[in-house]
Amino acid sequence: MRRCTAFFLAITLVSACARNRYTQAPTVPGDDPSFSAPERVVFPGLESDPPEALKVLPGDVVQLTTVSAKEQVYKGLIVDAMGQLHVPLAGDIQVGGMTLTQAEKAVETGLRRYDRFARANLVITKLGGHTAAVVGAASSPGRFEAVPGMRLADLFAEAGGIKEARSNEVPTLLGSLDLTRLVRDGETVPVSMRLARQGDPKHNIRVHPGDQLYIPPITDQLIMVLGAVRTPQPVGYRPGIRLTGVLARVGGLLPGRGDRKDIRVVRGSLREPQIYTTNLKALMSGKATDVELVPGDIVYVTNTWYATTADVLNALSPILSLANSVAILGVAGAISGN
């Protein structure tokens, strides 16, 4: 009997010593002097965003009315990819990029080779060339009609915002709002989507035909929750998210298996990760504070009270390579059951 007691006491001491090798997870990441958060890019927005005249663009459908000795109406004429409009008698007339007034004069010039009194009137009946694209992790990505006066927040709303997945009826965003970028003529426009949604005029700018709004997937904005939890899976990061909130999103610990006294947080470079430990039991009893997480953290709930770091890293190894690849999107997509 004494031998059994001594044996269990020895194991308990070894376990306690093993845990003590790891730094307690800081309440706030900045409490650890070795932590350096990635710098956030702050866009100044546009000081000037003047409206532009409506122009005829490739893909537009127009109605042409010619007036001379008699009036002729031509419906459904398409401006081709070269910006040309095929006008009966006059042939192909270059109108792409012109205002309606300029395009009418170009058509009249072409017609007056045959009728010097001809006048032309153009009306755009379908803004087929006036489109902007939303790509990436949007609810409904695609091309949308960029009507005059449309603003960035309108385009974002047309695409349904950021795609969501549901885990245990808790919505998780699969795209990053802060990393969303507006690309125009091959260059990034220095505006913030978050501020645009708030109506900031420097950021909620007018949408131009050809604009592309890219909503990046949250590949690097995930917190991986693994180990002895009900539903091991990635959880979308949001500012201020804490350990208890993340564990709640995955359904909590497995009864009888998850060690509430030894939950590991793996942070930083996967080549040289910083491994913290935290005691959920002490936290729930008010003897410890909740832990704020950062993007890229891996929360690992150990299976048993005697788990070592080698056990944890061995269990994580199949996931670590996954976390650095686009395959994580497949995992994130699985949250919604797609």
Image (cartoon, rainbow, N blue to C red):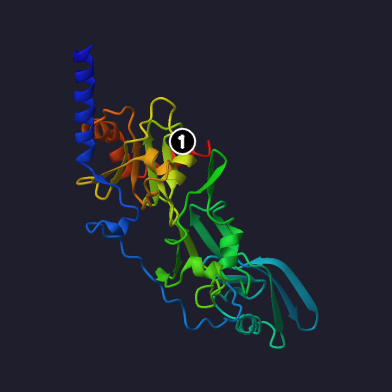
Asked if residue 294 lies left or right of residue 35, the reply is: right
Q: Residue at x 48, y 40 (%)?
A: 248
Residue extending farthest to the right is 70
Picture coordinates of residue 141, whole percent (x, y): 54, 54
5 is higher (above) or lower (below) than 111: above
> In the image, is residue 212 above or below residue 11?
below
Front residue of this view, candidates 272 and 219? 272
Give the residue type at disc 1.
Gly
Q: How many labels does the image show?
A: 1
Q: Where is residue 81 in the image (x, y as percent from the top left)?
A: 53, 65
Q: Quadrant of residue 305?
A: top left
Locate residue 158, reporting x and y percent. Answer: 61, 60
Side (left or right) of 76 relative to 153: right
Density class for disc 1 (Cα within 10 Å; few <14, some 14-19, many ≥20) is some
Q: Name the residue under label 1.
A: 252
**Residue nearer the viewer, 198 or 107:** 198
Q: Closer to the camera, 227 or 158?
A: 227
Q: Can residue 49 be seen in this view?
A: yes
Dot 1 falls on a residue whose secondary structure is: loop
Residue drawn at 72 percent across, 88 percent down? 117
Question: What residue occupies the far bottom of the structure in this picture?
Answer: 117
Residue 211 seen anywhere in this rendered image of the structure: no
Task: State which quarter of the image contains the N terminus.
Answer: top left
